[in-house]
Amino acid sequence: MDAQPDEEAQNLLAPVSFSDKLTEHDLTLTRGKTVTAQINTGLLCNQACKHCHLGAGPDKKEVMTPAVMDEVVEYVRRGDFEMVDITGGAPEMVPDIEYLVKELSRCVPNMIFRSNLTAIGGNGYKSLLKLLADKKVSIVASLPSLNMAQVDSQRGTGVFDKSIESLRKFNAVGYGCEKTGLMLSLAVNPSGAFLASPQVGMEKKFKRDLLNKHNIVFNNLFTFNNVPVGRYRGWLESSGNMAGYILKLADSFNSCAVSGAMCRTQVSVNWDGYLYDCDFNLAEAIPLGGVPTHISETSSPPEEGTEVAVSDHCYACTAGAGFTCGGAIDA
C-alpha cells in the first residue's frame, strides 16, 4: 500500500520509489501473523542523538500516560501477542514505566526492553533493573561503536563511559551471563552516512573487545542501517550526505530481506495509543492501513495478508541483510 505522507518530507531522492522497486521484483509487502506489539512509550530521552529517527530528547513532553498504558495492556491481552517490545525515547524515564512492565508481564510470555544504556545507569533506576530481571525481560541496549570518540560524537560527551558502566550493572544482576536466562543484546548502528557492517563479524569483535578491555559479556549483537527520517534526516541534509546515502540504500536493496521485514509480524503502538506498521512509519505519521486507528477502536492485531504502508525510507530495512526486530530471540 502506497503511503501518502507530506510530499516534501518524503522526497528522499531515491532513483526508483520503494513501491516501484517492489513491483520490479514482483513483490508485495504484506503481513504475516502479527505476533509482536512494539510499544513506543514516548519521545522523552536524556540524549539527543543525531541518528534518532524520532527526534527524541530531554525537552520532549510526549510520554505515555497511565490511562493509555491501561489501554495498551488491554489491547495486548485481547490480541494474544507472543511478545511485547518496549521502546522510546528512553522508556526508563517515563513515569509509571514499572507499572506498565508489571501489567504487560501478565499478558505475554516474552518481553523486550530497549535501553540507550545511559538513562538506566542512574541510581534512581535500581528498582526498574531489578523488576526487569525478576520478570526475565530481555534487554536490547544500543551501543553504536567500541570507539569512545565515535560514540560521544553521535550521542554526547561521556556517553561511552556511562554505557560501559551500565553494561557492568546489567552483568552484575546476571544479564548476558551463562545459565541465568537473562538475555542482553546489543544494537549497533553506523555513526555516519554509511551502511551497517556485517553482523557476524561485528558480534565477534564486540564480544572479544568488551570482554578483554572491560570484562563485559552479552548474548547477541544486531547491526542496523540508520533510517533517513527525523533528526537523522536533518543531519544528512545539513551535512550534504542525503542524496548519497539514499542511493547507497537503494543500490543495496535485497529482495530476500522483504520477507523478514519486522513490519510483517509486528504492530507499533504510539505513546498516544495510535497504531502504525512500524516505528519508522510512526515517526513519519503514516498510520496503519492509511487511517488513524486507536487501540481502543480495534479488538485484534492487523489481519494476516493486509498490505503494509510503504515509503522510500523502507529502503533502510531492506538494504543488505535487512532490518529485523532485534530481539526475536532483537535495540
Image (cartoon, helix red, strand yellow):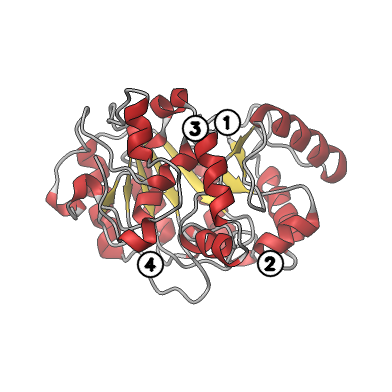
Task: Tell me which amino acid carries mark 3.
Answer: Phe
Of tags 3 and 1, the one toward the viewer is 3
Instruction: Return the x and y of residue 202 as percentages of the image width and height.
Output: 71, 34
Q: Residue furthest front?
A: 15
Instruction: Return the x and y of residue 176 as percentages of the image width and height.
Output: 66, 36
Of tags 3 and 2, the one toward the viewer is 3
Of tags 1 and 2, the one toward the viewer is 2
Of tags 4 and 2, the one toward the viewer is 2
Query: Mark 3 falls on what kind of element?
Result: loop
- Cα distance in 3D space between marks 3 and 1: 36 Å
Mark 4 or mark 1, which has the lower sequence index?
4
- Cα distance in 3D space between marks 3 and 2: 32 Å
**Residue identified by numbered label 3:** 253
Task: Tell me which amino acid carries mark 2.
Answer: Gly
Of tags 4 and 1, the one toward the viewer is 4
**Residue identified by numbered label 2:** 156
Mark 4 or mark 2, which has the lower sequence index?
4
Q: Are marks 3 and 1 in contact (CB under 8 Å)?
A: no
Query: Mark 4 falls on what kind of element?
Result: loop
Task: Tell me which amino acid carries mark 4.
Answer: Val
Taking the spot 38% from the left edge, 33% from the top edge, the residue there is 21
* Label disc, if present, on residue 181 of the rendered structure: 1
